[in-house]
Image (tube, helix red, strand yellow):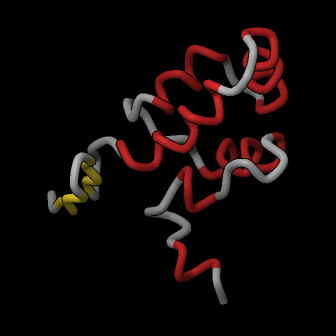
Amino acid sequence: MTGVTIPGRRLTVGYKWYTVAGMKLKAFLQGLTADEKREFARRCGTTYLYLKQLSGGHARPGPALARMMVKHSEGALSLTDLRPDVWPARMLSW
């Protein structure tokens, strides 16, 4: 698999993890209380533990979950933040 190196960060294309994509989610979750995190996860149809895996770069949200996360984050997250491999910034700027 090929990788793109950004100083201090790793973005690997293929079956590896997306460290850069998880950074925005991690920052978003850190701004929520424990109850707000659980409520956000519930609204998105997942668990807080899975959101934590996503924010750590250990998993990637599927397209449906990514859309729910964007919807319920009220603009704090974008599809490009969560899945740059599916929705590159240049594709969404048309």
Task: Point out residue 14 in the picture as x, y percentages from the top left corner.
Answer: 28, 55
Residue 33 as seen in the image, left or right of residue 87: right
Residue occupying the point 37% across, 30% down: 58
Task: Point out residue 49 in the picture as x, y percentages from the top left corner.
Answer: 57, 14
- Count of marks placed on residues: 0
Nearest the eye: 41 or 24: 24
Is 85 above or below relative to 89? above
Residue 68 as seen in the image, left or right of residue 15: right
Residue occupying the point 57% across, 45% down: 62
* Furthest residue toward top: 34
Q: Quadrant of the N terminus?
A: bottom left
* Furthest residue toward bottom: 94
Residue 28 as seen in the image, left or right of residue 61: right
Is 65 above or below relative to 89? above
Task: Point out residue 87 in the picture as x, y percentages from the top left corner.
Answer: 55, 67
Quadrant assignment, res 16: top left
Task: Point out residue 12 in the picture as x, y percentages from the top left corner.
Answer: 25, 53
Quadrant assignment, res 25: top right
Q: Quadrant of the C terminus?
A: bottom right
Residue occupying the point 50% across, 71% down: 88
Nearest the eye: 26 or 92: 26
Is 78 above or below relative to 64? below
Is 78 above or below relative to 21? below
